[in-house]
Amino acid sequence: MQVAEYADGRRRIVAHVGSAHTEAELGLLLGRARVLLEDAQRAELDLGVEPTPGRVDLIAAAEELSLFDDPVRLGPGVGQGAAPRVVATCSRVLFDALAGVFTDLGFDVLGDTTFRDLVIARIVEPTSILDTGRVLADLGQQPASEKTMR
């Protein structure tokens, strides 16, 4: 869902609100879009869709979800709803699935993990040997050196 405006016959995206996969998520996004519009003193965005009220609580109250008895002794920000951070991302599941197919086809009898990594990297993204290290890193693997791969 995006908030857009028309000016001089052109559409300009003002803000990207998000993507909804269910009616509940759509209702939340419509509420967020209305807040954005109120903040900018713009007229209400008429999408012709009425949000449906939530039927169940999506998240329990904070008092009910307690991992620790005394969050104060843990230090500032811990146990008090500190914002999560993404430390790293990789496609490890994809690598494991392709490694399983590699093994099922019987290529693992070679015993060469560098060859396996090269085959999997080329299946995921056909690229040069120089760039294969990047593909393997994206898959959560430690790439071998360029000389070893050659």
Image (tube, helix red, strand yellow):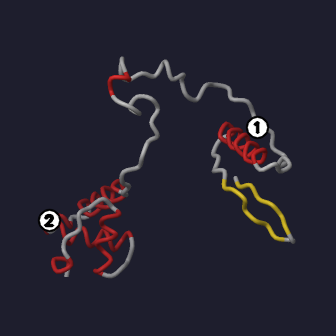
The amino acid on which the numbered mark 1 sits, given as a three-letter code, is Pro
Residue position marked by numbered label 1 in the rendering: 51
Across and down, in percent, residue 66 comes to 42, 21
Look at 20% across and 67% down and name the residue there.
Answer: 107
Residue 36 vs residue 148, the one in the foreground: 36
Look at 81% across and 48% down and name the residue there.
Answer: 41
* Mark 2 neighbour class, 10 Å CA radius: few under 14, some 14 to 19, many 20 or more: few
Establish if 71 lies above or below 90.
Answer: above
* Mark 1 neighbour class, 10 Å CA radius: few under 14, some 14 to 19, many 20 or more: some
Quadrant, the C terminus: bottom left
Across and down, in percent, residue 28 comes to 68, 39
Residue 131 vs residue 79, the one in the foreground: 79
Quadrant position of residue 10: bottom right
> Mark 1 to mark 2: distance in Å?
57 Å
**Tag shown at residue 19:** none
Q: Secondary structure at mark 2?
A: helix
Quadrant position of residue 70: top left
Left or right of 122 in this view: 80: right
Q: Secondary structure at mark 1?
A: loop
Quadrant position of residue 102: bottom left
Look at 36% across and 79% down and name the residue there.
Answer: 127
Establish if 4 lies above or below 144.
Answer: above
Residue position marked by numbered label 2 in the rendering: 109
The amino acid on which the numbered mark 2 sits, given as a three-letter code, is Val
Mark 1 vs 2, N-terminal side:
1
**Of the residues tagged 1 and 2, which is closer to the observer?**
1
Residue 32 vs residue 147, the one in the foreground: 32
